[in-house]
Image (tube, rainbow, N blue to C red):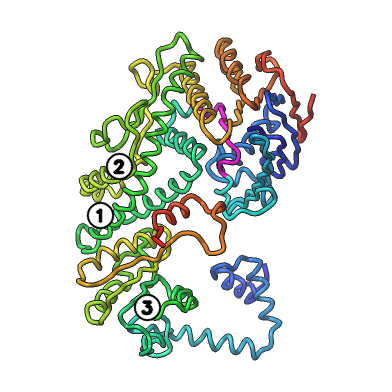
Amino acid sequence: MYIRHLQVTDFRSWDHVDVPLEPGPTVLVGQNGRGKTNLLEAIGYVATLSSHRVATDAPLVRQGCERALVRTAVVNEDRELTVELEIAAGRANRARVNRGAVGRPRDVLGILRTVLFSPEDLALVRGDPGERRKFLDELLVQRAPRYAGVRSDYDKVLKQRNALLKSAGKKRGDDPYAASTLDVWDDHLAKAGAQLLAARLNLVADLAPHTGEAYAGVAPDSRPARIAYRSSLGEALPEGYGEPGGERADPERLAEVLRVALGESRAAELERGVSLVGPHRDELDLVLGDTPAKGYASHGESWSFALALRLGSYELLRGEAGGEPVLMLDDVFAELDKRRRARLAEVALGAEQVLVTAAVDEDVPAELTGVRFAVAEGEVTRD
Amino acid sequence: MYEGVVQDLIDELGRLPGVGPKSAQRIAFHLLASDPQDIGRLREVLGKVAEGVRFCEICGNVSEGERCRICNDVRRDATSVCVVEEPKDVLAVERTREFRGRYHVLGGALDPLSGVGPDQLRIKELLMRIGSEEITEVIIATDPNTEGEATATYLVRMLRDFPGLTVTRLASGLPMGGDLEFADELTLGRALSGRRAL
C-alpha cells in the first residue's frame, strides 16, 4: 500500500499543509524544528491511533486550536480509501472513512499500516519493559486490529482488579464478599489476559526469525541477536509457546494456567495491592550472543537492535495479508555507519513506499533518490 | 464570567451529566427568559425530588408508593425476574413489550474503582426474593461492558446453588437492520459463539 495524499491541519507546528505522495522513496529534507517528524507522526497516528512521541493527544493539537485534522488517501491494491481523523485534546476523536463517519475511531485501524523507525526507538532496547510491551501490542494491532479492543478490555479489568485488591487488602479478611468478588475479577482477568498473552506469544514466535535476520543484515560482524518472550507465568507457561516453530499458543489453555497462577499468588497480591501475574508484567527479552542487550550492548549495537526490531516488524507485516506497510525512517541515517546505512537503504528500496526525513541531503544514501521535498517554515515544496 | 447568581446557576447546571459550559449558559439564559410559572413548576418538582424519591421496596425501581406499578401488577408473571443495573434499564426493557415478568434493580454494577462492591448493590435483596418468592427464572440484563460482565459472572456464581432456578444472560450480537460487514470483530465473534439452531 502507499499514501497518495497527506493533508494536515492544525497538527503540531503545521497550520495547514498538503503533500501529494508517490510510491517508492520520498525524502523530506529540512532544518531541525521545521516539522518533518510531525508529518510522519501524523501518518503514524492514522495507522495506530497513537503518537510515537507522546502518550496524550494534547501536544498534537496546534497551540490555540481546538482540534487537529489529518487526512490521508491510502491506496491498497488499486483501491483507494480516504481516512480522516479529527484529534481533539481531552475529548473523543472522530474518524471518517471516504467522508462517511465511522462508529469509533478504532474502526479505521488496519486501513493504513506503517512501520516507523525513529530516534525514540533506542528506548526499545534501553528503556523499561513497558516500552517493549507497547512495541508488541502496537504490532499486534497492526497485524489484527481486533487486539486494540482486547488490549483495552484487559486494561479495564486490570484497573478494577487492582482497585479491589487495594481495598480488600486493607480490610484484611473482614469483608466476606472480597474473596468471591475477587474470584469474578480473576476469571475475567484470566480470560482477557489469555487472549492478549496468546497473541503476543504467537507474534514473538513469528517475529523472532525476521528480527534475527534483520540484525545479521545490519550488523554482520556482531554477535547474533535473539528475542524471547518472558512471561510472568514463569515455569507454568506451556512448553514451546512463543518459540519459533513451537506450538501455537491456545487462549483457552492459557486462561486456565492464568487462573491457577492468580489463585496461587492471591495472598501476595492482597498484601501488595497489585496484580502480580498477567501480560502486564511480562517482558520481551532482547539478547545479544548470550548477554541481555539492555545494559550490555554498545550504543551502535543498541541502535542496530532497535532497527532490527523495526525491520523485522516490517518483513513480518509485508509477508502477511492486509497489504505491504508503508515504511517511515525518521532522521535515522545520521546515526548509522556506512555499512548500516547501505543495508537500510537496500531494504528501503525494496519497499512499496518509504518516507525518509533528514536534516541535510548528505545524510541520505545516494541510492535513495526518489521524490525530494524541501520542508521549510510552514510549507513543503517539491524539488 | 457573569456576575453573582447567574454564574452560580451556570456552574450548577454545568455539573449535570452531558451538559458542557456552553449548554449550561444556554439553559441558564433560557430559564432567565422563561415564564415565572414554568420556573415555579420546575422548582416544585426539584423540591419534591430533593425531599426524597421513593424506591419500590421489592424491586428497587423508582416508585410513587411503597411498591412500584410493575410489582403491584398481578397480571405480570411472578416467576420470571429480569435483573438490571439502573431504573432506566427497566424502561428500556419495558419498551420492547416482550417481557412480562418483573424486575430487580441492582443500583449499579461491580466497580471497585468507584468503591462499588456487592454490598453496595441490591444483591442480598435479590437472593432473599429468590428464596421467598416463586421465581423460577432469572434473566441477567447488565450492560455488556467490563463492569456489567463482572456483575453477571458474580450473580451466576451466587445463583447456581438455588435448585430448579434457570439463570440466563441477554444475548449479545448483531444489531437488527445492521450490515454484517460493518460489525466489529468482537461483536461478530460474540454473535458467532452465541449462535442458535433454527
The residue labelled by disc 1 is: A169
- Residue B103 - label: 3
Quadrant for the N terminus of chain A in the image: top right
Q: Position of residue A232 (x, y in %)?
A: 30, 37
Q: Is residue A166 visible?
A: no
Q: Could you give the CA–CA distance between mark 2 and mark 1, rounded to whole angstroms? A: 27 Å
Judged from the image, the secondary structure of the residue bearing numbered disc 3 is strand
Chain under numbered label 2: A
Of A59 and B110, nearer the camera is: B110
Chain under numbered label 1: A
Q: Is residue A309 visible?
A: yes
Which residue range is magenta in the image? A109-122
The residue labelled by disc 2 is: A254
The residue type indicated by label 3 comes to Tyr
Judged from the image, the secondary structure of the residue bearing numbered disc 1 is helix
Q: Could you give the CA–CA distance between mark 1 and mark 3, rounded to whole angstroms? A: 34 Å
N-term-proximal mark, 2 vs 1: 1
